[in-house]
Image (tube, rainbow, N blue to C red):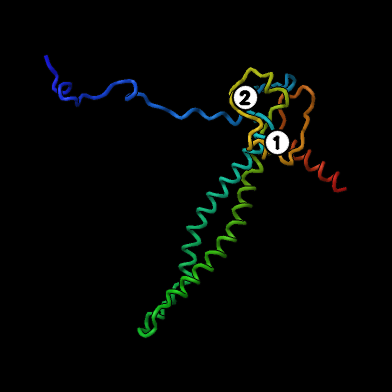
Amino acid sequence: MSFAGSADGSAEDYSAEATLVRFDPPLPLLRAPVRSPAPSGEGPVLAFRDAASWRAAWEAAEANLVSQCEAGARSGCSISASRKCKPPWWKGLFVAAPTDYEERERCEEREMAACLEAAKEACIKFAKAKCIGPFRDARIASEGLVENTDFHVWGAAADKSSSTSACALNNQQSFSPDPGATNYRGSDVLDSLSSKENNSSG
């Protein structure tokens, strides 16, 4: 028995190279389960690897919210500028009054710039308001827990000296939780920073 497909070379390629589906490597988790102190009686809780990753995640979340907010604002501002700068309806009644398109373009540019400037401030406030609650309540693994924990889901290739971590650690004061604590909340870091700033200013 002969196969016409194999004779003319048009048979489908079922080799490993042709049928292999490649997936992107999994991203390391932002938070991993860590145990709670024994007296608390709580189960495992999700915690950031350290204060640097917590701060970097906060900054990334705010940046994404601001970017999405500004993208929506650009659409709204373009519609608003077009409506504000279009000629009044009654000008169409006078045939001898041509539309000055150059003036309309300048008007739309002015309105767009003013609208986007106002939207930028509003988007920054919106992003901060949305992120402050979740990140204040977020938990951070205590120092030394990462090295002693059985969980290795933060990513073995994570480099703590990376530019992201270095940027996140700028102006980040060290915070030492109570002895024996496996994790602490982001609000503890914020309160510690606030108290240190008050002491330095006083």
On screen, residue 199 above or below 12: below
* Residue 186 disc label: 1
Residue shown at 15% from the left, 21% from the top: 7
Q: In x, y percent, where is residue 100?
A: 43, 77
Look at the picture and state if 90 lies above or below 167: below
Q: Residue furthest right?
A: 202
Q: Is residue 102 left or right of residue 176?
A: left
Label 2, secondary structure: give it: strand
Q: Which residue is at a point 63% across and 34% down the rendered structure image?
A: 162
Label disc, if present, on residue 38 of the rendered structure: none
- Left or right: where does residue 39 sit relative to residue 76? right
Task: Indicate the quadrant where residue 145 lies.
Answer: top right
Answer above or below: position of 177 versus 3: below
Q: Position of residue 93 (x, y in %)?
A: 37, 82
Q: Which residue is mark 2?
A: 33
Quadrant of the rendered image containing residue 178: top right
Could you tell which of marks 1 and 2 lies nearer the N-terminus? Answer: 2
Secondary-structure class at tag 1: helix
Q: Is residue 100 left or right of residue 188?
A: left
67 left or right, relative to 195: left
